[in-house]
Amino acid sequence: MARHHPRFPIIIETVREVTQDAYDLPGLVELMRGLRSGAVRLIEVVTEQPSPFAATLLFRYPGAFIYDGDAPLAERRAALLSMDPELLAAALGTLDLREVLDPEVLAEVVADLQHTASNRRVRIDDLPALARELGPIPLAELPDRVVPEESAALSDPRGADTTVLQLAGRPHLVAATDLGLLRDALGIPVPAGFSAPPTEGRDALTQLIARFARTHGPFTAQEVADAFGLGVATVGLVLERERVAKRLVEGRFTPAGEAEFVDPTVLRRLRIRSLAKARSEVEPVPQAGFARFLAASHHVDDPPRSSADEVLLALQRLAGAALPASAWETHVLPARLRGYERAHLDELLAEGEVVIRVRGSAGPNDPLVALVPADDLDLLGPPDAAPSAEAVALAERLALSDGTFASLQGSESAAELADQLWRAAEEGAVAPSSMAPVRARVGGASRGAHRARRPSPRRRARLPRPSRALLSGQGSLTPFQVSGRWYRVRDPLPSPADAALALASSWLERFGVITRGGVTADGTPGGFSTAYRLLATLEDSGKMLRGYLVDGLGGAQFSTPEIIEQLRRHSVPERATRACEPGTTKGPRSFPTSPTPILLAALDPHPPGRPRPRQPVRLNPPLAAAPDGAPVARRRGPRRAGRRRMPGAPDPRGPDPHALRRG
């Protein structure tokens, strides 16, 4: 837009402010003219450490996060690794990188330096060059550094440029050029047939230890002493001299916790690789990884065997979600428990471990039911509106009775009283003590939820049978849909602060990562704008972190450090290892495991983009098959409507009839 109005007063003033007030452009022009004319000389200076001004700039950004203990491990590692080691040692008093140097990276770097990695092994003809690079090599370790097809020819590795000497009680392969170093440093005589000129440069022992440092990872003085058969005190003097000369770095780099030394070049290599790995872990997780995380956290990828304890754990993970009653025991719980049995839920309700709360209705004869553990009632929240006067009056009558339907009956008919009782339940004034009335309400003997009454296909005349109305719950007996005991709901109202914390906790339990889509689908009053203020407050208090955690789900995402670390473990699909084929020299290969499709109801709380539960739903709601987190198929409508598959989805009727596991 600014390009089309270059003479606009605001644009002109902005450019003037930037070029004259914020930046001294006239001074820059004068400096450049001086450089061109030779009046000003440019001299390049390499300093061992940054100037005080530059050191402050280097420390300012990571220093703002270095003491943030609530940040996830990947963020802490990236912030520490991005700092200069000397600045870090000056800030902390000592250089301690045990928690930030990745152990796998350390092993890879050491394998590269020692030529034990598969792509760094050498042939027998290259052994002299290897001995000159690494120094004396124990004969027992030579096969680890030679390509497998030539390892059998290592019976006598001697050659014109190499020999075998005893060092620290073990035979070593030594390059002929190192015989003078070993003679002057360790007093080992030169074998017959070889000549060794005097050592030039620094003393021989310092040269041996310096090469040891260049070809090893972090090491202790004891390791060097064992390698050359020297005393620890003697080695310690050389290491201290090298540290003072800044040719070695002292600190703690491995979980052992001892004072260790490392060559600066090797440390830089370790930092660069560890920083690259840490930054890759900070990258947002793909949506498929988020789906894998949700499937694992809700146990829909590998459901446990149904039991009362497992049902209680599944309900705790759902954190008070209000769902259509028709979906609880047909889709939601069977997807999380293998061989789900209603008796397990009935046992929890009878023992008071779980209570039933109703929050409106999803359709005719299909109330929105929340199965809440008794200790997690604060996660459910109050109804959207206060109960009506009729509902409160019925709840008062219920409190004065024994809780049965028969004790409530008055002048109204049984059908009218049953409807009044369920309306009061949907408004949150009363609740049943068992699932029997809920099951009868959803799919009773005469009709089910979302299904209109149809005329009987029988057209012949029949004699009336008085007992038929009694058995179907349409006479003077208690209707099935209000059977059992009922009670008045008097849940304690938490304070606004506790209610806000409970609401955020319920989102974390269900979604792991709180996003705009999850909050909107949950039907939170006020939408995401209200939730954002709550989440920002929790972030300021250090209870939650904000970041771009899942790719494609918006920039405002919130979670806790523990959940973020669990989420990142699912970033890459699990891989299996296949052994090499007989007769080949190829090693084991890893390959992605074949994902198992999971059939879930579209209103299941597990998918982060599920529809709002208060929207009307049909019988047999859409079912989404999600292998490895990617939706591939949907089943629409009743059984007669057949199945429709999304474009590119595999055919469930293919060669594997068990490809889709019904949840």
Image (cartoon, rainbow, N blue to C red):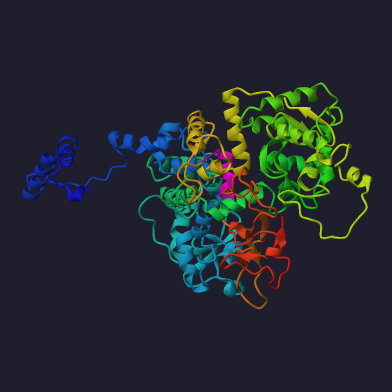
617 left or right of 473?
A: left
- Let me know if residue 433 appears in the view: yes
Pick the front one: 585 or 514: 514
Res 373 quadrant in image: top right
Residue 543 figure quarter: top right
Give the x, y percent position of residue 343.
Answer: 85, 44
* Residue shown at 43% from the left, 50% from the top: 272
Residue 454 placement: quadrant: bottom right
Range covered by the magenta-colored residues: 558-569
Residue 252, position as x, y percentages in the image: 51, 40
Q: Is residue 99 visible?
A: no
Q: Position of residue 166 (x, y in %)?
A: 57, 59
Q: Give the residue drawn at x 48%, y 63%.
A: 131
Q: Position of residue 408 (x, y in %)?
A: 83, 28
Residue shown at the point (65%, 69%) measured from the top left:
651
Q: Residue furthest front?
A: 461
Asked if residue 559 is among those painted magenta in the image, a careful observer would answer yes
Q: Nearest the camera: 322 or 18?
A: 322
Based on the picture, tell me whether residue 287 belongs to the magenta stretch: no
- Quarter of the figure that contains the C terminus: bottom right
